[in-house]
Image (spheres, coloured by chain):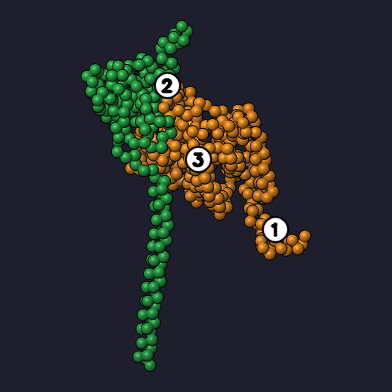
Amino acid sequence: MRIVRRWFGERLPISGRQFRELTNEPVPYHLKRWWFALGGTPAYLFVVQIFTGILLAFYYEASPSTAYQSVEFITNEVSFGWYVRSVHKWAATLMIVAVILHQIRVFFTGAYRRPREINWMIGMCLLICTLLTGFTGYSLVFEQLSFWGATVGANISDTVPLVGGFMKRMMLAGDSYNQATLSRFFVLHAAILPVMITLLVAVHITVIRLQGVTEFRFKDEESGAPKTFNFFPDHLYTELMIGLVLMILLSALATIFPATLGEPANPLQTPDIIKPEWFFYVAFRWLKLFSGTAAVLSMGFIVFVMFAWPFIDGWVRKHTRFQEFSVYVGILAALAIIVMTVWEAVARH
Amino acid sequence: MADEEKRGSGTEGEGSDRRDFLKNASRAAMTAGLVGGYGGFVLVAGRYLYPASSGVAMWQFVAEVAGIEVGEAIRYRGPSGETINITRRSREGNADDFIALSSTCPHLGCQVRWEAQNNRFFCPCHNGVFDPSGKATAGPPGEAGQSLGRYELKVENGLLMIAVPPPQFSAADESGIIEDEDCISGPGHDPCLGGRPRGTDRNRNA
């Protein structure tokens, strides 16, 4: 045993003590509260997505003539295919929910403020990549709604001034949805976006480690409560417990509400009622309220404001007396998003 | 001695200038090589991914003019997958009898449908409305002044021809008149909204 240890020690010169030092960063005590552990949840769900996504890719065929049939085959013929597909679908839904909740938590606790502005912007990139992965993934099913959702999505990019036409043609591989479009969505969904998310998460976590987690104190805390606790094993156990709960939740959702399959895509007929996935309801309603370019430019402006929010908030706090400015803006934005999402969900057109 | 020192330092100065020059030149060459090499690769990759342009429109046969009644509409699929509503409006026997409108909504690319009861084309995606001549009258296309695209038509030896983009890699099947639909969407015909055209069920019952 000693010989084996020495052999590995010579080739991998990391001692157990060094490894513990590397991973065992003291974690601020407020992370005992579960809503502060929401950042780890999308990361865990992302791993689930990679695993189930690889399984689905064994049978999926990214071509308009076979895509729908391959999804049907996975759902109805392959052993546990329905389960793998349903877990993939529900993990995507929960991942988007967790990313949004994590962002809301960071926003309302002001954890994006100096010196964490760059990490907020990396988080915004992660949010956009997550939404794009959801969009491209849904289009792969090639059912009526997903086909028309993808068509509308690609045409939205066309309304962007100057570069819109280029973006649309790059996305669709032509002027309209064609044989080559689906494989582009597949490459984006299964290769480019996951790699980007992995790299961004690595940078996100590295910056957190470099800057340390923001520390909070709560009124109900005992005065003698310790400032920190150990990452290993305390926080790791918390994350493992969250992982276990998520796996149970995913299995339950996949079993009770399995992923369904609508009518196959028909490029000649748009369905009477067309809706995107729920996380795009806001954008879809916005597009109905304003005409093409105005809607896209205003959406782009809102995304820009979200990116630059740490600097806008910093300027307002420095030059005005509205110290709680961000809280009111956050409440208003959340209400607007909820209202437009519900409006789109209940409206026929 | 002093002269030697002067000479020595002068040689050293020249040597250092030369070294600096060579250092800067090699840095510039290295940078140019990297930018040229990898930049060229990025350009090639970009060109590889960017689809070729659709090219000049070509004339395609649609139907015999005598086979289309006044008020009748046919739905035609072009070689690159676009769907077109062609309606006959008069009996002159030339191309002005017909109007060929794209059935793709100019707002965000959904398929419009003909609503006979409202005498309009309607886009279900964002509530776009167009009159029978394809002019946008309401919804986002109306606000932005985006009417339905029109295709050029001509009549040659009694045959109706249409100018359409050349074939692309289409998601739909082959080009031609769409006949496998339950109903035809276009002015002069029963709406597609209810599924089958009027009379079908009655015939079936009989």
Query: Image point 49% across, 36% down: which residue?
Result: A63
- The disc labelled 2 sits on which kind of residue? Glu
**Label 2: chain letter:** B
In three-dimensional space, the C-alpha distance between marks 3 and 2, rounded to whole angstroms, equals 30 Å
> Image quadrant of residue A295?
top left
Chain letter, green in picture: B
Query: Image point 44% across, 24% down: which residue?
Result: A271
Q: Report whether residue A302 is seen.
A: no
Whether callout 3 and callout 2 share a subunit is answered: no
| Label ID, residue A186 | 3
Query: Image point 38% across, 62% down: which residue?
Result: B32
Query: Toward the viewer: A104 or A269?
Result: A269
What x and y, as percent, mark residue A45? 59, 40
Q: Mark 2 points at which residue?
A: B181
- The disc labelled 1 sits on which kind of residue? Gly
**Label 3: chain letter:** A
In three-dimensional space, the C-alpha distance between marks 1 and 3, rounded to whole angstroms, equals 42 Å
Question: In this rendering, which labeled residue sits more in front, label 1 or label 2?
Answer: 2
- The disc labelled 3 sits on which kind of residue? Phe
Q: Name the residue under label 1.
A: A16
Packing grade of label 3 (10 A; few <14, some 14-19, many >=20) is many
